[in-house]
Image (cartoon, helix red, strand yellow):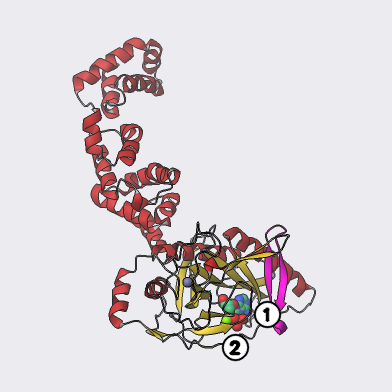
């Protein structure tokens, strides 16, 4: 424990995955679009144009608020935040300053030592994104395609006390945004960005220290590096009795340093006022009740439940809960198979591998959870061995969408449990491996493995391993 206690609060921007932009009919997907091709008079702020709110964004905002355990405000409204910047053609941003879509909430995280902690959410509000500037040697380029993209800004309370907590919280919120379906939250695509507010105080001190905000961190690694640097920098200043200035800083990915951008004295005065062109947003009691019913179990709750109820390993639990599609797949597999361990093993190794290699989400696979549940049952009732499932069935299912049952029939993969067939193979194994036989008879039980292997090979993996073992032991008595 260092001399100072770390105090951190996060402001997280998440782009919503709506069809259209926040206040116009432009597509919200500019991924492959030419710069400045996906714009219209509304998102370019031409005089006399009237914005209108995107209902899908409001509903998805409420969904996100609910999964963050926030109180949803039935009436919220939009305001203008006035400032001039080259990426913002309107000269202001439409945001929610006075009455946001949500009030307070919280997110639960689990730390490496197993301890659980609640981090308060101050509120979440909706706003529109600005354009994108690219700085080159010749000058700066601007692309307005991103103007008007719906954003959620999640503001946490200063409840975070370590880099680990900040990082765990960031990742949990990323999962939550994906779980509720409101954002794809891909950091590589700039869909999720963090501002971190950091201050230090002596342990036991009641009052918070002066905070510094480091803006626009676009990876978890950058967030962790920026915090590490900032904590170090502020500790040194406090040790030297220097006064920490309330300021905004940027992070330089190359040097790993934070650099001052503006101090409190030069802070903008945004001259907020209610957006005159947009009416207040109302969410009906009925809609809210419906949305509450649809909130999925949170990933952390799933992780804890999978561990306690099914005794799964932590690595498996993490993979299964990472995305709702995977969790749903797993849950429908175990409904069929009643075997969480084997279902989890198959899903976390073979299915995840296939999905990753083919860049497919789980709900886009040709195979569903029930089909994997059926496969597990066929292993458990000895129709096939695990090896056959692994080597000859799973990939074929994934490639063709056929059921395990039909692949077994078509390819003749049924496990051989016929005693006389197995006995014939075992006798051949004994004949062909005198050395192993000698070793087994001499007391080396492990040597029987060579004989089992021989039979497996002869039977193309279809002989039941339990029966092989039993028969060999009998013949070698
Ligand atoms: P501002 O008025 O500068 O916008 P806010 O009180 O609205 O500050 O808080 C903005 C963010 O800064 C929130 O995430 C909050 O949790 C965090 N924060 C506030 N005070 C501190 C502090 N002393 N140290 C660290 N973070 C803080
Ligand atoms: Zn537009
Ligand atoms: Mg504030």
Q: Quadrant of residue 58?
A: bottom left
Residue drawn at x 39%, y 52% is 361
Crowd tier of the residue under label 2, counting other residues whose Cα lies within 10 Å: few below 14, some 14–19, many 20 or above? few
Q: For mark 2, what is the residue?
A: 271
User: Mark 1: which secondary structure?
Assistant: loop
Between 161 and 215, the one nearer to me in the picture: 215
Please provide the residue range marked out in magenta. Answer: 246-266
User: Which residue is under mark 1?
Assistant: 210
Q: Earlier in the sequence, mark 2 or mark 1?
A: 1
Q: Label 2: state its secondary structure.
A: loop
Q: Position of residue 70 (x, y in %)?
A: 42, 77
How far across and how far down the image is residue 40, in percent? Answer: 49, 72
Residue 19 drawn at (x, y percent):
40, 66
Residue depicted at x 37% and y 60%: 302
Q: Residue at x 58, y 75 (%)?
A: 89
Asked whether 28 falls inside the magenta stretch, the response is no
Q: Is residue 474 left or right of residue 357?
A: left
C-alpha gap between disc 2 and disc 1 = 24 Å
Q: Is residue 254 magenta?
A: yes
Horizontal and vertical percent for residue 139?
Answer: 71, 64
**Res 207 quadrant in image:** bottom right
Left or right of 454 in this view: 185: right
| Vertical arrangement, residue 164 with respect to residue 203, above or below | above
Q: Is mark 2 within 8 Å of ligand 3?
A: no
Any part of residue 53 in sight: yes
Question: Compared with residue 252, is residue 397 higher up or lower down, i.e. above or below?
Answer: above
Label 1 CA crowd tier, 10 Å (few <14, some 14–19, many 20+): some
- Mark 1 sits near ligand 1, with its Cβ under 8 Å away: yes
Q: Quadrant of the N terminus?
A: bottom right
Q: Nearer the viewer, residue 86 or 116?
A: 86
Do residues under tags 2 and 1 come within 8 Å of each other at their CB atoms? no
């Amino acid at each position: 424990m260092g001399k100072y206690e770390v105090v951190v609060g996060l402001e997280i921007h998440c782009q919503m995955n709506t069809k259209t932009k926040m206040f116009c009919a432009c597509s919200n997907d500019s991924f492959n679009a030419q710069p400045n091709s996906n714009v219209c008079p509304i998102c370019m702020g031409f005089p006399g144009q009237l914005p209108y709110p995107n209902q899908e964004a409001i509903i998805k905002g409420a969904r996100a608020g609910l999964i963050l355990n926030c109180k949803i405000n039935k009436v919220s409204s939009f305001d203008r935040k006035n400032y001039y910047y080259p990426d913002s053609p309107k000269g202001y941003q439409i945001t929610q300053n006075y009455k946001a879509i949500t009030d307070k909430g919280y997110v639960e995280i689990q730390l490496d030592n197993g301890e659980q902690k609640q981090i308060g959410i101050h509120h979440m509000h909706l706003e529109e994104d600005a354009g994108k500037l690219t700085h080159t040697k010749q000058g700066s380029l601007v692309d307005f395609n991103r103007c008007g993209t719906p954003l959620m800004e999640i503001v946490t309370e200063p409840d975070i006390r370590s880099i680990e907590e900040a990082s765990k919280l960031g990742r949990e919120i990323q999962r939550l945004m994906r779980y509720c379906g409101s954002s794809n939250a891909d950091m590589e695509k700039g869909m999720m960005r963090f501002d971190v507010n950091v201050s230090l105080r002596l342990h036991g001190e009641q009052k918070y220290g002066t905070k510094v905000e480091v803006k626009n961190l676009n990876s978890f690694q950058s967030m962790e590096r920026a915090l590490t640097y900032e904590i170090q920098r502020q500790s040194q200043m406090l040790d030297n009795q220097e006064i920490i200035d309330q300021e905004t800083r940027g992070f330089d990915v190359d040097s790993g340093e934070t650099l001052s951008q503006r101090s409190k004295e030069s802070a903008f005065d945004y001259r907020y006022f209610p957006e005159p062109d947009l009416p207040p947003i109302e969410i009906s009691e009925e809609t809210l009740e419906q949305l509450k019913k649809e909130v999925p179990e949170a990933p952390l709750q799933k992780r804890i439940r999978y561990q306690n109820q099914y005794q799964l390993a932590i690595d498996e639990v993490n993979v299964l809960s990472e995305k709702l599609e995977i969790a749903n797949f797993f849950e429908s597999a175990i409904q069929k198979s009643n075997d969480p361990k084997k279902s989890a093993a198959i899903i976390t190794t073979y299915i995840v591998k296939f999905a990753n290699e083919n860049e497919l989400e789980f709900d886009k696979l040709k195979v569903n959870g029930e089909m994997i549940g059926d496969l597990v049952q066929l292993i458990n009732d000895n129709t096939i061995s695990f090896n056959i499932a692994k080597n000859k069935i799973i990939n074929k299912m994934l490639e063709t969408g056929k059921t395990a049952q039909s692949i077994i029939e078509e390819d003749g993969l049924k496990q051989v449990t016929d005693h006389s067939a197995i006995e014939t193979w075992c006798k051949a194994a004994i004949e062909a491996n005198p050395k192993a036989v000698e070793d087994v008879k001499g007391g080396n039980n492990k040597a029987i493995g060579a004989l089992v292997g021989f039979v497996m090979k002869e039977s193309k993996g279809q002989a039941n391993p339990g029966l092989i073992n039993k028969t060999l032991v009998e013949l070698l008595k």
